[in-house]
Amino acid sequence: MTYDREREIASSWERNAGAWSRAIAENRIASRRAGTDRAMVETIARLRPRRVLDLGCGEGWLTRALVERLGCRVVGADGSRDLVETARRLDPGSTYLHLSYEAIIAEPARLPEAVDLIACNFALFGQALSPLLAALTSALAPGGAIVIQTLHPWQSRPGGRYRDGWQTETFAALGGEAWDAMPWYFRTLASWTGELGTAGLAVVEIVEPVGADGGDPLSLILICRRAAGPGPGATSRAA
């Protein structure tokens, strides 16, 4: 059952690719307007990478933003052929790979080599993340980081219940399109650190972006490095 749901996540992005690209272009996602985009770009900028892999790049907005702001070399990768084609059309100067998570796990050598940072911006929705995360570590340069932005576990807990489990995203809040529902796996902070630890990674910093009103966190950003590698002790701060 879990395997079927993991495959359904990938196929839903194929079916929703056009609607998603239009939602991004029309700036319809409230959390992005409130600050999650800015928080991800600023977190990455602070780490000053020269080579970046934007995993689950979608139509490529983050790749384009990092190239423009940091002048670094960014490769985007996504499992949706339509999204990759849109990214290439919007940004012919960058490299975009059509590469599924299954393919990455099976052949990590297909990833770019020796990147300073791998960005996973709302791109990890499955239950079994450690095989993918372990494969990603093979692409990191010494001292490199994986930066994950995801739903904040406390704010997104389904029905007020703080426990791991499968949920369904209908995209109803985005409106104006015929969306196909997508399964996604809700996980607690402990579950996140467990998956990362199994993959040989450690959280070295937690960022919890808040909106202009200074209220509840908009998202959770985890900065991770190889568990045996360099890095400070885990810290937490609001952005």
Image: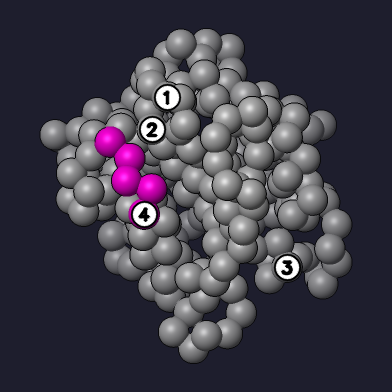
**Amino acid residing under circle 4:** Arg
Q: Mark 4 highlights which residue?
A: 46
Name the quadrant containing residue 238: bottom right
**Amino acid residing under circle 1:** Ala
Q: Secondary structure at mark 2?
A: strand
Label of residue 154 in the image: 3
- Compute the Cα span from label 1 to label 4: 17 Å
Mark with earlier residue (1, 4): 4
Mark with earlier residue (4, 3): 4
Task: Report if the CB atoms under discs 1 and 4 are less than 8 Å apart.
Answer: no
Q: Mark 2 highlights which residue?
A: 116
- Asked if residue 79 lies in the magenta stretch, the reply is no
Name the quadrant containing residue 144: top left
Where residue 80 sits: x, y (%)? Answer: 43, 33
Q: Secondary structure at mark 3?
A: helix
Nearest to the eye among marks 1 and 3: give it. 1
**Amino acid residing under circle 3:** Trp
- Compute the Cα span from label 1 to label 3: 33 Å
Mark with earlier residue (4, 2): 4
Q: Which residue in the rendered view is the most extreme toward the bottom?
A: 213
Of the pair 44 and 18, the residue shown nearer to us: 44
Label of residue 141 in the image: 1
Mark with earlier residue (1, 2): 2
Where residue 31 sits: x, y (%)? Answer: 48, 70
Extent of the magenta region: 46-50
- What residue appears at the point 48 percent right and 38 percent down from the top-left corner? 145
